[in-house]
Amino acid sequence: MYSTPPVRPADGSSADTPRTAGEARDVVTRLLAAEFDELSEEILSNVIVADALLVTSEIVTNALRHGGGLTGFSARITEGGLRLVVDDADPRHPVRQEPPPGSVGEGGYGWSLVHRLTRQLSVTPHEGGKRIVAVVSLV
């Protein structure tokens, strides 16, 4: 099993912490490529990989937009799937919104999507922010 080194800087900043959701997706893509030897276009279009990258993007974007900034990030493959750990600077729990049936909105439903796509999800407040741990099944 492969993993990225945990990134939990004491001051809330680190050169190793992704600065964008795209950088976090790149970390996860490299991790999945190492686990599965190579990611062909066919595998990259796989729903499971797409779900893993979508969850990565959503929780990192939420930390950047609503959580006061991304203060830590790690990803690793476990027996349960892809385990993502995201720390941000806001201790408040994300708000889950469900779109009205048949509506087409411009956002605000990412946390609900994360709930649907993960097999485990936890939010733990800590001094200076919170930690979100999400596990996405890879089978």
Image: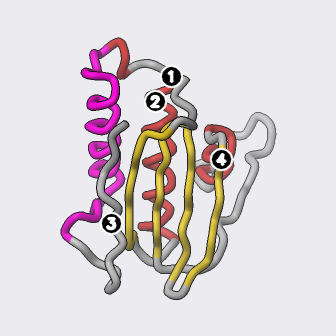
Q: Where is residue 39 in the image (x, y as percent from the top left)?
A: 28, 21
Q: Where is residue 79 in the image (x, y as percent from the top left)?
A: 53, 35
In three-dimensional space, the C-alpha distance between marks 4 and 1, rounded to whole angstroms, equals 18 Å
Residue marked by disc 1: 47
In three-dimensional space, the C-alpha distance between marks 2 and 4, rounded to whole angstroms, equals 17 Å
Quadrant where the C terminus is found in the figure: top right
Q: Residues within 10 Å of mark 1 (few under 14, many from 20)?
A: few
Number of dots carrying numbers: 4
What is the number of the mark on residue 120? 4
Inspect the image, locate mark 1, and give the three-letter code of the amino acid beneath it: Val
Residue marked by disc 3: 7
Inspect the image, locate mark 2, and give the three-letter code of the amino acid beneath it: Ala
Q: Position of residue 135 (x, y in %)?
A: 56, 45
Mark 1 and 2 residues: CB-CB less than 8 Å, in contact?
A: yes
Q: Which of 109 and 113 is in front in this view?
A: 113
Q: How crowded is mark 4: few (under 14 residues within 10 Å), some or many (20 or more)?
A: some
Magenta residues, start to end: 15-41
User: Which one is closest to the eye, mark 2 or mark 4?
Assistant: 4
Q: Nearer the viewer, residue 120 or 117?
A: 120
The residue sitting at 44% across, 28% down in the picture is 49
In this picture, is 31 found above or below 107?
Answer: above
Q: In screen coordinates, is 34 left or right of 116?
A: left
Label 3: which secondary element: loop
Going from N to C along the chain, the mark reached first, 3 or 1, is 3
User: Which one is closest to the eye, mark 3 or mark 1?
Assistant: 3
Q: Where is residue 12 in the image (x, y as percent from the top left)?
A: 34, 80
Asked if residue 13 is among those painted magenta in the image, a careful observer would answer no
The residue sitting at 27% across, 31% down in the picture is 34
In three-dimensional space, the C-alpha distance between marks 3 and 2, rounded to whole angstroms, equals 24 Å
Q: Which of 97 and 78 is in front in this view?
A: 78
What is the number of the mark on residue 50? 2
